[in-house]
Image (cartoon, rainbow, N blue to C red):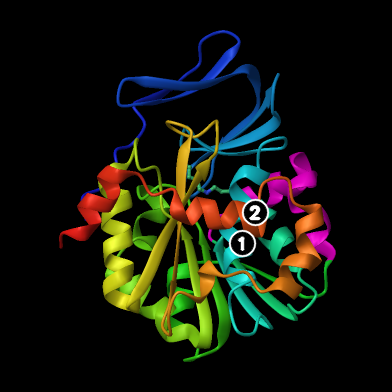
Amino acid sequence: MPPAPTPDSTLAQEGWIDEIHQGVRYGLAGRVLHEQQSPFQRVTIIESERYGKGLLLDGCWMTAEHQERHYHEPLVHPALCGAERIERVLVIGGGDGGTARECLRHPEVRHLDLVEIDGLVVEWSQRHLPSIGGGCWSDPRLHLTVGDGIAWAHQAPDASYDVVIVDGSDPAGPAEGLFNRAFFVQCQRLLRSGGVFATQSESPEAFRQVHLDTVRLLREVFGHADPLYGWVPMYPSGWWSWTFAALDGPRYRQARAERAAAVAEGCQIWSPRWQEGAFGAMPAFIARELATP
Ligand code: SPD
């Protein structure tokens, strides 16, 4: 897979914070509150006018208080509403806590391993973006490990999770290894029968090749994989995707009614109806590309 284009730079123009990608600026009016180089990446906390406080890693938008639901709900609920059981969940990445928070809204989840490589992301998210993790940090079902999620995936026993979710950043820097065959094979090995895998799979516009390669690779490894399309307005192009895979058929496409009922009321974006449309919203050029090997 070719490396994802890295942002040209973050333009620190007075009053604006921008991710610049392939000649386009994706920016918010605001100011930088904290910035530090961790052992893995440059971590930035900002305050924006429109979306509240937000997080960038290496100059790329990750999340913001008043927009994170556009990203976390579509990543979590198709998987958690589609898997046969959801007792044991693994989240790789996701150090801001938003993915874990959405998973833990499902009462059937008994144990959630959250493995985030960068302790500074967790620490600053807990301190500066507490609404994103919500109650997840004190939920006894959450087991946080600051460590390498790729190594975790290689070392965990076969069939040890019902759901595996990858909430990484773009495939450059520490997240690069979250998009390759060796990693996906391990994720597949970790799933119990009836399990579901989910990953953010980049933009069909701004990261088209990475998106296509990711869907193709997951189809090869799992036998079934389908992208779902939605919007994360502050990400490059605003048009985003999440891809789901399972061994025993596309069970992630159909939300189980009782699980959906338990969470839908508290969602801003996701609902079974939204999910059905979002799986169906594959653009024609992507459908044509995916039809050819
Ligand atoms: N280009 C941004 C991709 C970011 C995906 N992960 C965001 C982390 C939110 N929990």
Q: In this view, does 282 lie to the left or right of 42?
A: left
Q: Residues within 10 Å of mark 1 (few under 14, many from 20)?
A: many
Disc 1: residue Cβ within 8 A of ligand 1's nearest atom:
no
Q: Residue 209 at x, y = what percent? A: 25, 46
Instruction: State the CA–CA distance, disc 2 to disc 1.
Output: 5 Å
Q: Residue at x 66, y 80 (%)?
A: 86
The overriding secondary structure of the stretch rendered in magenta is helix
Q: In this view, does 173 lie to the left or right of 97?
A: left
Query: Where does the N terminus fall, quadrant-wise?
Result: bottom left
Q: Residue at x 62, y 43 (%)?
A: 70
**Which residue has dot 1 on it?**
76
Q: Residue 231 at x, y = what percent? A: 53, 39
* Camera-side residue of 13 and 63: 63
Q: Residue at x 73, y 59 (%)?
A: 101
Q: Are marks 2 and 1 in contact (CB under 8 Å)?
A: yes
Q: Is residue 6 above or below residue 103?
A: above
Q: Is residue 272 above or below residue 144?
A: above
Reply yes or no: does residue 128 show up in magenta.
yes
Q: Note whether residue 142 is visible.
A: no
Q: Residue 256 at x, y = what percent? A: 66, 74
SS at mark 1 in the image? helix
Magenta residues, start to end: 117-138
Query: Splitting the image into 4 quarters, where does residue 99 fall?
Result: bottom right
- Tag 1: residue type? Val
Q: Is residue 93 above or below residue 50?
A: below
Query: Where does the C terminus fall, quadrant-wise?
Result: bottom left
Q: Residues within 10 Å of mark 2 (few under 14, many from 20)?
A: many
Reply yes or no: does residue 65 show up in magenta.
no
Query: Splitting the image into 4 quarters, where does residue 216 fall?
Result: bottom left
**Which residue has dot 2 on it?**
73
- Tag 2: residue type? Glu
Q: Note whether residue 223 is visible.
A: yes
